[in-house]
Structures are given as structure tokens and as C-alpha cells.
Image (cartoon, helix red, strand yellow):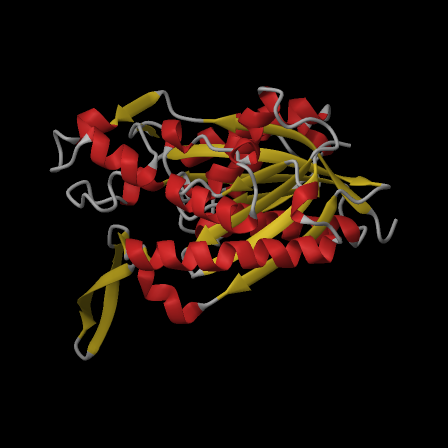
């Protein structure tokens, strides 16, 4: 049982039905379709209605991934939900477990913002490689529209809502070829969804805090600089661990934050444009959902085929960043 490898055997995705085009954003803030599209590559984003929940989106993506892997929910041993926007501050993975009917699975949330899916992939792999679990469901899902200041034109144009999921299974051949993860808390202040509290006197001389959260704040220039410098480095590290060179990669699948970042990273790594997967024009930055959402679309479109080698990297708040090199399929 020990020292088993992992295979990524199924994928799924789900997005809300409501879309918000750049043109409509001009009714909210002073901006233009051209300004947003040229600076970010984003044309529209999906927004969850007040009646829609993260756990419902995550469950829809999960059901697709489970079906595509050819297993049943009751076969799952572990569910990892990478999210920064749970329906419940105590976590939403258990709600997803219940909705799926995954009666055997232990479930918990993992928070690493836009790096969440890559961090989750590496975490899931360790459980499988140790022989503890055989079938793991990894979900990346976020509803960032809940936490956007719709009067802040620097951030409100960027984010969208969605969910993506993959099934990882124990395998004789290990399809996770290499990975590297990093964190730097000294740069934490560049991207936040900060806690804010108001003091409340409980009893004389005893004050507590009544908690809430501020909208997302971001220093775009610093985050761009960080991503363009650190992401090529971490992909190089993961490739070195995988004993592969850049030209052996079939696809570059980055966190879908900004088309300029995707282009700059590909350029630094000398990866041609036709190997770069991008769907942010339609969805914007969906945080932990962005990589599995783009992965699932590329698989369903027939771009990513069995045995293709994918270099993926997530980067974002924390600041955190990571890369994984994997081979798609059994």
C-alpha cells in the first residue's frame, strides 16, 4: 500500500449563470471595456446570486469530476475544499460531503487564496502516497463577489465566481512529477481580505470585538511584480524536481489572474503562446477555482489529452505561490 503514486482521473467545473460584461461595469465605476480588456484580458465574469452558495457550486463541479473519474461519491476517502470564501467561517467542505452523499469521506477546508488549488493538489498527493487514502476529491471554489468593493475600480473589474474539481486516485505510476511551494508573509499587506472589528463592552472593564471583514484590497503593481518574478522561478524548481525541461511541457496552466501575467511568465520561460491555457476573458479571476476551471474546460475541449504534461502554478494572497508538474490521466 505504501509509496503509491497518484493519477488525476477526472475533472469538473461549475459557474453561476449570471454574467457581468465589462460594458455594464461602466454603469458602476468610471472605466471602459477597452481599459479593462487591454490591462487584464478580462471581458466578463460570472456572479453568484444571493440565493446561490459556495457549497452548491462546489458540489456541482464535484459531481462532474466524480462521474468523469468513473467512481461514485461513496468511493471517496477524502474531500479537500480550497477556498477563501466558505459559506460558513468554520468551513464548507462538510456541507459538500453531505450534498454529495460521500458517506465515507473525511472533509476539510484548506485556505491559501489563489494558490489554494496547487497547495491542495500537493496535500492530497501526500495522503495518497502515504497509503492512507485511495480516492481524493480536490475542489477549488470561490465567490469573491461577496467581498468586492463595487466602487473600487482597481479591484471590482478583476474578480468572478466559480468552482472546479478533480479526482485524484492511487496509481502504480506517479503522475505528480514534481512540485514546489513557497510563502512570504512579509508581503502579506499587498493583497488582503482583512478582518475588521468594532469594540463592544461586554461588562464593565471587559471589552470584546464584534467581528466583520473589509472588502478586498490590493496593490496591483506589487502583486504583478511578485507574480512575474516568482512564478517562473517556482515552475523551474518544480521542473528540476521532475527532471524535465521547459520544452517537454505540453501546457502551461497558470492561475487566471491577468492576461499580462500569463504572457510575461510564458515569455520568461520561453513557452510559446499556443501552449498557454487561458479562459480568464470569460470568467475573470476566480481565485482557487481558476486552475481547475480552466483545466476542466481544456480537457473537455480536447486540448489536454491523456499523458500530456501540464505545468501549473498558483500565486496570490499570503503571499503564497506554488507550482506542480503533472501528467493528465490514468
The answer to whether 174 appears left or right of 283 in the picture is right
Q: Quadrant of residue 292?
A: top right
Q: Quadrant of residue 15?
A: top left
Image position of 187 with respect to 116: above or below = below
Image position of 300 with respect to 111: above or below = above
Work out whether residue 158 can be spotted: no
The answer to whether 67 appears left or right of 49 in the picture is right
* Residue farthest along the bottom direction in this orientation: 205
Q: Quadrant of the C terminus?
A: top right
**Residue placed most toward the observer, 232 or 290:** 232
**Residue placed most toward the observer, 201 or 306:** 306
Give the x, y percent position of residue 4.
83, 48
The answer to whether 75 appears left or right of 156 in the picture is right
**Residue placed most toward the observer, 176 or 64:** 176
Q: Could you tell me which residue is drawn at 38 percent across and 43 percent down? A: 260
Give the x, y percent position of residue 259.
39, 39
Tally the marks. 0
Work out whether residue 280 can be spotted: yes
Q: Could you tell me which residue is drawn at 36 percent across and 54 percent down? A: 224
Q: Quadrant of residue 258?
A: top left
Q: Could you tell me which residue is drawn at 36 percent across and 20 percent down? A: 17
Q: Could you tell me which residue is drawn at 22 percent across and 31 percent down? A: 34
**Residue placed most toward the observer, 94 or 155:** 155
Image position of 32 with respect to 217: above or below = above
Give the x, y percent position of residue 322.
55, 55
Give the x, y percent position of residue 49.
30, 27
Amino acid at each position: 500500500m505504501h509509496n503509491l503514486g497518484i493519477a488525476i482521473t477526472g475533472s469538473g467545473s461549475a459557474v453561476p449563470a449570471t454574467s457581468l460584461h465589462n460594458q455594464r461595469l461602466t454603469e458602476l465605476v468610471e472605466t471602459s471595456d477597452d481599459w479593462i480588456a487591454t490591462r487584464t484580458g478580462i471581458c466578463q465574469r460570472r456572479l453568484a446570486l444571493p440565493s446561490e452558495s459556495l457549497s452548491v457550486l462546489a458540489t456541482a463541479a464535484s459531481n462532474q469530476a466524480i462521474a468523469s473519474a468513473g467512481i461514485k461519491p461513496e468511493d471517496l476517502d477524502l474531500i479537500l475544499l480550497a477556498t477563501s470564501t466558505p459559506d460558513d467561517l468554520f468551513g464548507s467542505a462538510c456541507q459538500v460531503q453531505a450534498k454529495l452523499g460521500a458517506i465515507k469521506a473525511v472533509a476539510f477546508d484548506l485556505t491559501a487564496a489563489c494558490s489554494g488549488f496547487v497547495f491542495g493538489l500537493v496535500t492530497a498527493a501526500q495522503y495518497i502516497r502515504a497509503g492512507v487514502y485511495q480516492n481524493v476529491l480536490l475542489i477549488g471554489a470561490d465567490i469573491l463577489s461577496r467581498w468586492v468593493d463595487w466602487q473600487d475600480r482597481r479591484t471590482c473589474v478583476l474578480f468572478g465566481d466559480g468552482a472546479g474539481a478533480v479526482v485524484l486516485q492511487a496509481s502504480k505510476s506517479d503522475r505528480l512529477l514534481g512540485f514546489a511551494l513557497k510563502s512570504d508573509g512579509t508581503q502579506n499587506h499587498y493583497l488582503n481580505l482583512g478582518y475588521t472589528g468594532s469594540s463592544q463592552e461586554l461588562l464593565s472593564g471587559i471589552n470584546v470585538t464584534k467581528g466583520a471583514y473589509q472588502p478586498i484590497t490590493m496593490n496591483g503593481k506589487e502583486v504583478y511584480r511578485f507574480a512575474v518574478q516568482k512564478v517562473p522561478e517556482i515552475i523551474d524548481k518544480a521542473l528540476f524536481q521532475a527532471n524535465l525541461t521547459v520544452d517537454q511541457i505540453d501546457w502551461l496552466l497558470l492561475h487566471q489572474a491577468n492576461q499580462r501575467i500569463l504572457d510575461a511568465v510564458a515569455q520568461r520561460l520561453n513557452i510559446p503562446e499556443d501552449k498557454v491555457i487561458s479562459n480568464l476573458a470569460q470568467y475573470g479571476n476566480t481565485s482557487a477555482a481558476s486552475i481547475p476551471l480552466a483545466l476542466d474546460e481544456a480537457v473537455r475541449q480536447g486540448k489536454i489529452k491523456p499523458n500530456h504534461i501540464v505545468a501549473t502554478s498558483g500565486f496570490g494572497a499570503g503571499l503564497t505561490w506554488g507550482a506542480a508538474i503533472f501528467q493528465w490521466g490514468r
